[in-house]
Image (spheres, rainbow, N blue to C red):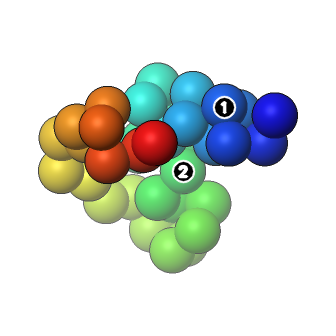
Amino acid sequence: MFDNICKFIAENFSDDLATWLLGSPLSLTVLDPTELQ
């Protein structure tokens, strides 16, 4: 269950996720869905 939620957040809110984790906005590279399995 948590894997699906994390995958959804990473795919749809990557900028917000980076800001939350790192404390500053950062554009993440394009995630290949196979990397999130």
Q: Secondary structure at mark 1?
A: helix
Q: Please tell me whether residue 16 is drawn above or below residue 26 in the rendered image.
A: above
Question: 32 or 20: nearer the eye?
Answer: 32
Residue 34, image x and y in percent?
30, 37
Please give the residue where the numbered disc 2 appears in the rendered image: 17
Question: Which residue is outermost to the right?
Answer: 1
Q: Give the class, few, some or many, for how many residues have Cα within 10 Å of label 2's Cα (few <14, many ≥20).
A: many
Residue 14, image x and y in percent?
42, 42
Q: Please tell me whether residue 26 is drawn above or below residue 11 in the rendered image.
A: below
Residue 27, image x and y in percent?
25, 51
Amino acid type of disc 2?
Leu
Question: 21 or 8: nearer the eye?
Answer: 8
Question: Which residue is outermost to the bottom?
Answer: 22
Residue at (61, 60) in percent of width and height: 20
Q: Secondary structure at mark 2?
A: helix
Question: 2 or 27: nearer the eye?
Answer: 2
Image quadrant where residue 4 sits: top right
Can residue 10 be seen here? The reply is yes
Amino acid type of disc 1?
Asn
Residue at (45, 68) in percent of width and height: 24
Please give the residue where the numbered disc 1 appears in the rendered image: 4
Can residue 27 be seen here? The reply is no
Residue 7, image x and y in percent?
55, 36
Q: Give the class, few, some or many, for how many residues have Cα within 10 Å of label 1's Cα (few <14, many ≥20).
A: few
Mark number, residue 37? none
User: Mark 1 or mark 2: which comes first in sequence?
Assistant: 1
Q: Please tell me whether residue 22 is drawn above or below residue 36 in the rendered image.
A: below
Q: Is residue 5 left or right of residue 20?
A: right
User: Could you give the CA–CA distance between mark 1 and mark 2, rounded to whole angstroms?
Assistant: 15 Å
Image quadrant where residue 8 sits: top right
Mark 1 or mark 2, whichever is nearer to me:
1
